[in-house]
Image (cartoon, rainbow, N blue to C red):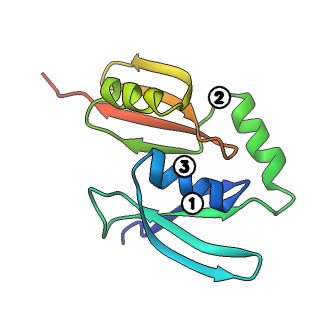
Amino acid sequence: MRINLTGVFVDDQQKALRFYTETLGFRVKHNIPLGEHAWITVVSAEAPEGTELLLEPDGHPAVAPFREALVADGIPSASFAVDDAGAEHERLLAKGVRFVQPPTDLGSVITAVFDDSCGNLIQIMEEKGQP
């Protein structure tokens, strides 16, 4: 068994598609029109056959209160692995990304959290080498 697909709810699929591709650097895997919305998935440029991230429309009535509660409590909707959290933080800052938590050393990992501009907090995480 393996993880094939996971998703984040987004308030605007086209805005999310631009952010996740142009700003974060993911690649489009699927963009299939489905009436008002689309089946849009992106993948890591480093692992194009890896896990897909679905940019899911947030129209279900349960989504807004759930997401608002997560954001209010500072809880990320997703976590992405990076090789160097400090360098990724600087790269994204230069692209105008708003961070709610700068790179923070938590012992075995360094994390930072940013606003994806589509209603979510997203964490980046660097695993530190073991001594």
Cα distance, mark 3 to mark 2?
Answer: 20 Å
Q: Which residue is mark 2?
A: 74
Q: Amino acid at mark 1?
A: Gly
Please say if 55 is above or below 92.
Answer: below
Check contact, mark 2 vs mark 1: CB within 8 A. Answer: no
Label 3 vs label 2, nearer the camera: 3
Image quarter (top left, top right, bottom left or bottom right) of the N terminus: bottom left
Cα distance, mark 1 to mark 3?
Answer: 15 Å
Dot 1, crowdedness within 10 Å: few (<14), some or many (≥20)?
Answer: some
Q: Secondary structure at mark 1?
A: strand
Q: Which mark is residue 19?
A: 3
Q: Which residue is mark 1?
A: 7
Q: Position of residue 110 (x, y in %)?
A: 36, 24
Q: Secondary structure at mark 3?
A: helix
Q: Which residue does the image show at 33% across and 65% down from the upper left?
A: 50
Classify residue 8 by image quadrant: bottom right
Please say if 106 is above or below 71.
Answer: above
Q: Which mark is residue 131?
A: none
Q: Could you tell which of marks 1 and 3 lies nearer the N-terminus?
A: 1
Please say if 92 is above or below 22.
Answer: above
